[in-house]
Image (cartoon, rainbow, N blue to C red):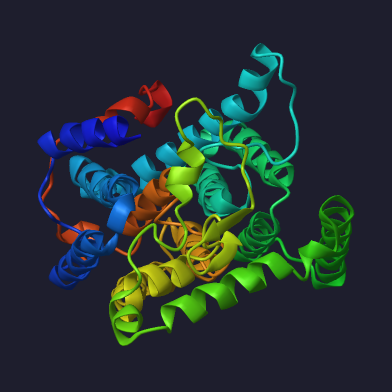
Amino acid sequence: MLLVLTGALWWFGAAGHGRRGVSRGEVWAGGALLGWLWLCLLRSGERWDTALAATALTTLALLTAWAWARAVKPEERPQALVLVLGAAAVGTALAAWIVPLVLHQGVGWRPGLPIGGASNNAVGLTLVLAGVITGRRMWPERRWLWWCLAAVTALLVVQSLSRAGWALALVVAVVAIVRHRHWNLRWGGPAVLLVVAVGLGELTRRRGLSLFVDEARWHNITTGLDAWSGSTSAVLFGLGPMRMWPWLELERGRPGEQFDGPLQYDGPWGAVLYHAHSTYLELLVEYGMVGLALLVVVLGLVVRRCVREIRRGGELELVAVAVLLALPAMLVETYLVRGFPSALLFWCAVLVVGPFETLAAQAPQGPGLVSRLLRRPSTPDDT
């Protein structure tokens, strides 16, 4: 992952078109957050190596998305984003269905995938679903292709058995229906309630009562907050990355051992889950109030971009809704600092929706990569 993101960062950075689309305030906010994450490495203790790797991945996910946005002409960024999300749907389907069959492993529930596995990748699938639905409007002549990708993404969400994934996908679907005015109040409301009831019943059958009350997560939260509130320095600056939840070290495993996904980890402050299961909780406990405040500032700027895209009714209105849905989803899973493929998609979407400059104000430029790939051959009827 480090090699792929570093290579992509270099490749896109060499073809950049300036810093258009990113305000000075956003640059300062993002830089301050990344700077604090790197500064907190001084408090990581003996786990400095895995903390360094995780911080590098977090930084590269954001910087690679920024370099990708610069490499695409501003007027082509919406189309480029939808193509990226469509490619993510195809790649995830190959990893979820084709690869297990080739390896004679069988296709099962909750597969461990870069995008679309369990709950920690629900945001990635939600963005992909919003993107492929948007692609149907951008390229109506290829409507059947985007409908197929939407169906594939929906099946991947169902396969994940993720509470967050199912809820987010349902909201995206309802927003898409309402947005295109295909909503009938006489049957639409009962149909949604029926889908919700069936979905909750199936999740309860497969996951048990932990669907509603997960005692392990509540214990994880209370133990983390008790450790965080133990001293003034911890409250302000955090315990240090990987000290409370050394997830990367446990997932990597020791030499000669294979990680089997243990749920509990006996740490210095008691038994906890091996990762925080909440982006905000991890930032608060391991990076302190300073780290959480910087994250809130960055996410506030993200909300401003999404609201701007929704108010003007842009092409990526549904993607902006998916980005907004990711923010409450971060309460229950560790996005941005652990699910790096989903983090890359998240930042790509954020940097494209709600741009500050209008396309009409931009200087005319030659055809870019996206327009050359998708240009339809001229016919006599076009003249």
Q: Residue at x 42, y 73 (%)?
A: 285
- Occupied quadrant, residue 67: top left
Q: Is residue 21 above or below residue 85?
A: below
Q: Nearer the viewer, residue 271 or 313?
A: 271
Residue 206 versus residue 282 in the image, above or below: above
Residue that extends furthest to the front in the rendered view of this protein: 268
Q: Quadrant of residue 168?
A: bottom right
Q: Quadrant of residue 113?
A: top right
Q: Tell me if I can see residue 339 in this picture.
A: no
239 or 197, nearer to the observer: 239
In front of the other: 78 or 259: 259
Q: Residue at x 14, y 55 (%)?
A: 362
85 up-or-down from 20: above or below: above
Q: Give the side of residue 145 with respect to residue 32, left or right.
A: right
Question: Picture coordinates of residue 167 (x, y %)?
Answer: 68, 62
Residue drawn 28% across and 76% down? Answer: 237
- Please give the count of numbered marks on the rendered protein: 0
* Quadrant housing the N terminus: top left
Left or right: residue 229 compared with residue 98: left
Can I make out residue 273 in this image?
A: yes
Residue 304 in picture, x, y percent from top left: 34, 75
Q: Position of residue 24 (x, y in %)?
A: 13, 69
Image check: 248 left or right of 348?
right
Q: Residue at x 65, y 66 (%)?
A: 178
- In the image, residue 92 lies at what x, y percent? 56, 33
Which quadrant does the C terminus fall into?
top left
- Does 40 appear above or below 84? below
